[in-house]
Image (cartoon, rainbow, N blue to C red):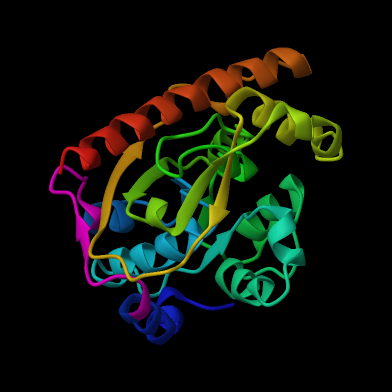
Amino acid sequence: MKRIKDFSFVGKALTKVLAKKITFHPASDNMQEILADYPQLVVALNHGPMLGPLATTIALNKLYSENGGGDRKPIAIMWRLFYQIPLYKYAIQYITQVDRGLNFDEFLDKMENGGFTDLLVKPEGENCNYGNGLDIEPFLSPRFIEFALRLNVPVLVMVHQGSEQWGTTLPVSSKLDPLLKKLPKKSYDRIRETRLLNIPKLTHRLKELKVMYKLYQPEITLADLPEDLEQRKALIAEESEKVRTLMQSMIDTLKQG
């Protein structure tokens, strides 16, 4: 199990390759206070394009390292397909601290009993592949809210701007639908809606990686969740949409400079 400080050498090396500078928006919350007040956090991140996790990795490393979080032990949820991509999967395994995609209960156990302090999630999931790489796509899963409720912790919402330059958006013709039907249903439905496909393009170092973060306290508690499964899913999804709205407002702020 690696601490944030154990990632520092790789983080600094990656930063030199990926971004000339990382800046944190002044309207962000006080990170030193957040880390001091909350021994555990669920961290909800915007995805950006497929290569966006590289940007969030160096941004989080800098944010935690400079605010007293060097001893925190992060674990990350990533799209399961990433673990099947040659070479790239090794970077994902290093970043996430797991060697495969775990299920909800397995991640919850890691946080409750495995000594991890920060659960990093990108709720947009694979929907990142079907947009412009910057604006917040519909959340593929809202269950990060359930993680926060079960762990009784707030959600640190962090977004970045810049990594959208590492992707190229291509139009997708309806003529390809017979082939696209082989994708998972949620992916197929989303690509039919957007008619866009974001292709990785890591061609240059970013001039600036802009970051903003806010602490979000869920407006519901674990006790509020109905026993009925469908009602519970609906309530969790409703709460997650508040986070998505917050994320988009933060992205809009970063767009303004």
Number of residue marks: 0
| Residues rendered magenta in the picture | 17-31
Side (left or right) of 161 relative to 151? left
Residue 224 in view in this figure: no
Residue 119 on image: x %, y %:
54, 54
Residue 112 on image: x %, y %:
63, 55
Residue 129 in view in this figure: yes
- Asked if residue 223 is positioned above or below residue 151 in the image, the reply reads above
Quadrant location, the C terminus: top left
Identify the image quadrant of residue 253: top left
Side (left or right) of 163 relative to 250? right
Tell me if residue 155 is in the magenta stretch: no
Residue 159 on image: x %, y %:
36, 46
- Asked if residue 110 is positioned above or below residue 217 in the image, the reply reads below
- Asked if residue 189 is positioned above or below residue 152 in the image, the reply reads above
Residue 228 on image: x %, y %:
77, 14
Residue sitting at x 49%, y 23%: 241
Tell me if residue 29 is in the magenta stretch: yes
Residue sitting at x 32%, y 49%: 161
Side (left or right) of 156 relative to 24? right
- Asked if residue 238 is positioned above or below residue 67 in the image, the reply reads above
- Pick the front one: 254 or 93: 254
Quadrant location, the N terminus: bottom right
The kind of secondary structure the magenta stretch mainly shows is loop
Residue sitting at x 64%, y 72%: 88
Identify the image quadrant of residue 71: bottom left
- Pick the front one: 76 or 18: 18
